[in-house]
Amino acid sequence: MLFAGLGNPGKEYKKTRHNIGFEVIDELKKISQIKEIYRKKFFCGWKVILEEKEVFLIKPKTYMNESGKAIKSALDFFDEKIENLFLIHDDLDIELGKIKIIKDRGPGGHKGVISVMENLKSNNFVRIRFGIKGEKIETNFINYVLSPFLPEEEKIVEATVKKVISAIKEILRSNLEKAMSLYNN
């Protein structure tokens, strides 16, 4: 299985809403046993042991709108099937604090997901959607997703990252359907 978090490279994007996929991958690395590290043209990757299973963790080096190039490169490099891809990304249609796990669905307007689907010519993979929609959005959507979480949102973000990690552990322990039934609320 290959778990890929979407985000933008660079310090200026580090703690932004759009980079929550990177944050989840960073937390997964902390709780995993790292076996190998890969630094490729389009991605950074890690072979890890998580829940007694060998999986790959990926962070694209491309910007969000070109994520598909990195994901395709990683799938090819690791000789992994599209249906074993788990894409972790922010979602402006879901309230902050909630997650939704889906498979075989459209991109919902997310430019990174659109890029992945276009490059893979498929939507036959799992998406773990991390809600970033706050109470008030007082700017355009691009500025909003590229802004940091507010101080009062930080605890919710931390708890939601833990929820995503728990869902991933459930997928690895049991199966996708059980994780969906437990975490799609």
Image (cartoon, helix red, strand yellow):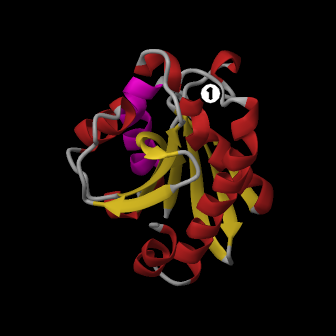
Q: Residue at x 74, y 36 (%)?
A: 152
Q: Is residue 159 left or right of residue 80?
A: right
Q: Residue at x 58, y 32 (%)?
A: 17
Q: Check residue 185 for magenta coloring.
A: no
Q: Which residue is mark 1?
A: 16
Decide whether the magenta segment is chiefly helix, strand or loop. helix
- Please provide percent x and percent y for residue 30: 79, 54
Query: Relative to residue 151, is residue 181 depicted above or below?
Result: below
Q: Quadrant of residue 83?
A: bottom left
Could you say whether the residue bearing mark 1 is in a helix, strand or loop? loop
Q: Residue at x 47, y 54 (%)?
A: 78
Q: Quadrant of residue 176?
A: bottom left
Q: Nearer the viewer, residue 39 or 69?
A: 69
Q: Total of numbered circles in the picture? A: 1
Identify the magenta region: 64-77
Query: Relative to residue 163, is residue 97 depicted above or below?
Result: above
- Please provide percent x and percent y for residue 54: 61, 69
Kind of residue at disc 1: Thr
